[in-house]
Image: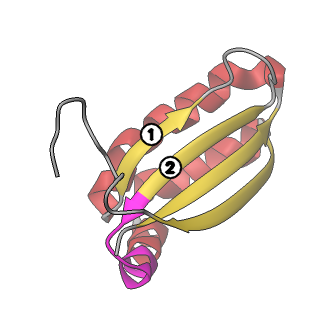
């Protein structure tokens, strides 16, 4: 069963460029550590202080293995320190969601 870690961030609107850099940094780190990065999403219209990150895993055990690899990854450590140093993240919440298989990553014209 696929699970997705849905991360909601409250960010400092004036530091959105720093958050974007933070998110871009994860683009290589997360897959290297075993996560299926669905993407990071910045505010565009409406609320200007909320951003999201979505990462999928084949199981909760795979997520736990990913977290252990992430703790050992130098680039990951540096990215966490970057966020702490620049203080563009005010709050972070994680929710774990189970995908409905018949709807997960559907593409136009795809039949199941």
Which residue is farthest top? 45
- What span is colored magenta in the figure? 56-65
In this rendered view, identify the residue nearer to me: 53 or 34.
53
Q: Which residue is mark 1?
A: 39
Disc 1 on helix, strand or loop?
A: strand
**Drawn side of residue 19 relative to residue 72, left or right:** right
x, y percentage for residue 51? 68, 36
User: Residue 83, image x and y in percent?
Assistant: 68, 43
Horizontal placement of 83 versus 61: left or right?
right
Contact check, label 1 and label 2, Cβ < 8 Å? yes
Residue beneath the point at 38% across and 79% down? 65
Q: Magenta stretch: dominant SS?
A: helix
Q: Earlier in the sequence, mark 1 or mark 2?
A: 1
Label 2 SS? strand
Q: Is residue 35 magenta?
A: no
Q: In the current view of this chain or complex, which residue is farthest to the front?
A: 111
Image: 12 above or below 6: above
Please report the residue visible at 65 percent of the width from the left and 26 percent of the height from the top. 18
Residue at the limit of the structure toward the bottom, as seen here = 61
Badge 2 is on which residue?
54
| x, y percent for residue 96 | 57, 68
Label 1 and label 2: CA atoms lie apart by: 6 Å
Give the class, few, some or many, for how many residues have Cα within 10 Å of label 2's Cα (few <14, many ≥20).
Answer: some
């Amino acid at each position: 069963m696929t699970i997705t870690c849905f991360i909601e961030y409250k960010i400092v609107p004036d530091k959105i460029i720093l958050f974007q850099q933070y998110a871009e940094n994860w683009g290589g780190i997360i897959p290297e550590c075993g996560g299926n990065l669905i993407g990071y999403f910045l505010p565009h219209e409406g609320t200007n202080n909320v951003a999201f990150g979505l990462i999928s895993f084949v199981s909760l055990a795979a997520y736990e293995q990913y977290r252990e690899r992430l703790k050992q990854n130098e680039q990951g450590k540096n990215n966490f320190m970057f966020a702490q140093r620049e203080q563009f993240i005010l709050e972070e919440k994680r929710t774990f969601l189970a995908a409905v298989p018949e709807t997960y990553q559907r593409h136009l014209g795809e039949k199941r």
